Image (cartoon, rainbow, N blue to C red):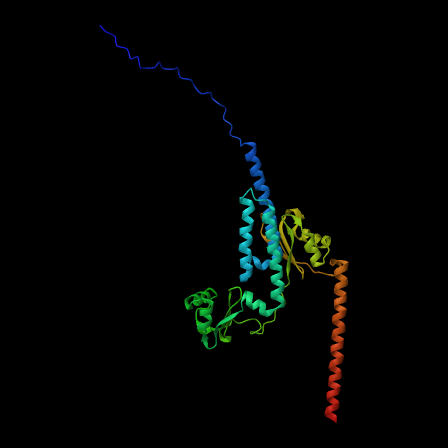
């Protein structure tokens, strides 16, 4: 019996197992450094953008004119560049933001000083509805359709065009409506109802903390007011979630987990700080002097009229 061997077959090599390396789930030092740099960049750009928006005024957050909207969009774009690209120095984002704020400041001065420049840059209010009806030419210039105008009127609770005397598109794009007198809601003045003027309320306690700056705005002594509040509430300031005080002495206080309580503090001279007391006295003297001058002037006018009538 012949045994055939395959001389071409190479002898198999023993399998070599790969070494098992320990698994390290932690990030490399270089990656941690990059992430730390990104966080620092984001914080810096965030602070700079907040500062720029504050310098540009609160109107940037609400109603913006065209050039202000453009500047806001540019700020948003410039702020993302140094945050997304690590190779770009952070100053390449901060410097343009500062320049943009300066440009906005200069434009604001220019538009405030020159009405013609303000109309050129920001446009001017357009009357789209007047007593004669809709001004379709103004609507065409503003690229607004009649349906869009009706939609904006409905949003302002005007469902009938006959109730509208004037409708004006402001520079910011907001619609202002002046209704006809017959469609205006009745007021207390129309009904001859006299009501005392409403005082302004200040937050004086929040989350158990007394807000001293608002007491300074009111010109009231903290110890006197807090003594009355704690006496009425039978608790300390730290137990009060929220408290407000009006200039006339009306108090609104709510403790943690309880319903609110309203009461009034009779504000006398002992409650005022020395500075506020001096201001009130000076104001009272000035008002008294003005009343005296008005009275003397009225008496002089009556004497003159009487002499003229006698002659």
Viewer-closest of 73 and 179: 73
x and y percentages locating residue 209 in the rendered image: 66, 48
Q: Residue at x 56, y 38 (%)?
A: 35
Note whether 138 is above or below 104 in the view shown. Answer: below
The x and y percentages for residue 255 are 61, 49
Q: Residue at x 73, y 84 (%)?
A: 301
Quarter holding the N terminus is top left
Q: Nearer the viewer, residue 11 or 7?
A: 7
Quarter-of-image position of residue 217:
bottom right
Task: Point out residue 87 in the picture as x, y percentages from the top left corner.
Answer: 56, 42
Q: Is residue 255 visible?
A: no
Above or below residue 143? Residue 243 is above
Q: Give the residue at x 54% y 54%.
A: 74
| Residue lying farthest to the front in this orientation | 8
Q: Quadrant of residue 221?
A: bottom right
Q: Is residue 102 above or below residue 83?
A: below
Farthest residue toward the left?
A: 1
């Amino acid at each position: 019996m012949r045994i055939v061997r395959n001389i071409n077959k190479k002898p198999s090599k023993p399998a070599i197992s790969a070494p098992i390396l320990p698994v390290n789930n932690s990030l490399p030092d270089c990656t941690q450094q990059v992430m730390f740099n990104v966080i620092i960049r984001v914080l810096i750009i965030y602070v700079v953008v907040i500062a720029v928006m504050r310098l540009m005024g609160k109107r940037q957050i609400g109603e913006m004119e065209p050039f202000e909207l453009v500047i806001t969009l540019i700020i948003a774009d410039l702020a993302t560049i140094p945050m997304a690209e690590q190779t770009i120095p952070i100053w390449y984002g901060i410097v343009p933001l500062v320049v943009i704020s300066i440009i906005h400041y200069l434009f604001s001065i220019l538009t405030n000083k020159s009405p013609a420049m303000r109309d050129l840059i920001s446009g001017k209010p357009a009357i789209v509805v007047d007593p004669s009806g809709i001004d379709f030419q103004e609507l065409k210039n503003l690229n607004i359709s009649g349906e869009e105008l009706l939609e904006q009127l409905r949003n302002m609770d005007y469902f009938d065009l006959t109730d509208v005397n004037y409708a004006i598109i402001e520079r910011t794009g907001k619609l202002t409506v002046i209704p006809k007198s017959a469609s205006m809601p009745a007021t207390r003045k129309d009904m001859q109802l006299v009501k005392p003027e409403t005082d302004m309320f200040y937050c004086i306690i929040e989350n158990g903390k007394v807000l001293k700056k608002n007491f300074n705005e009111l010109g009231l002594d903290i110890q006197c007011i807090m003594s009355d509040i704690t006496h009425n509430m039978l608790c300390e300031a730290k137990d009060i979630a929220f408290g407000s005080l009006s200039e006339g002495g009306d108090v609104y206080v709510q403790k943690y987990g309880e319903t609110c309580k309203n009461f009034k503090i009779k504000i006398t001279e002992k409650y005022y700080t020395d500075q506020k007391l001096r201001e009130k006295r000076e104001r009272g003297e000035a008002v008294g002097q003005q009343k005296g001058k008005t009275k003397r002037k009225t008496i002089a006018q009556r004497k003159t009229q009487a002499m003229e009538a006698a002659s």
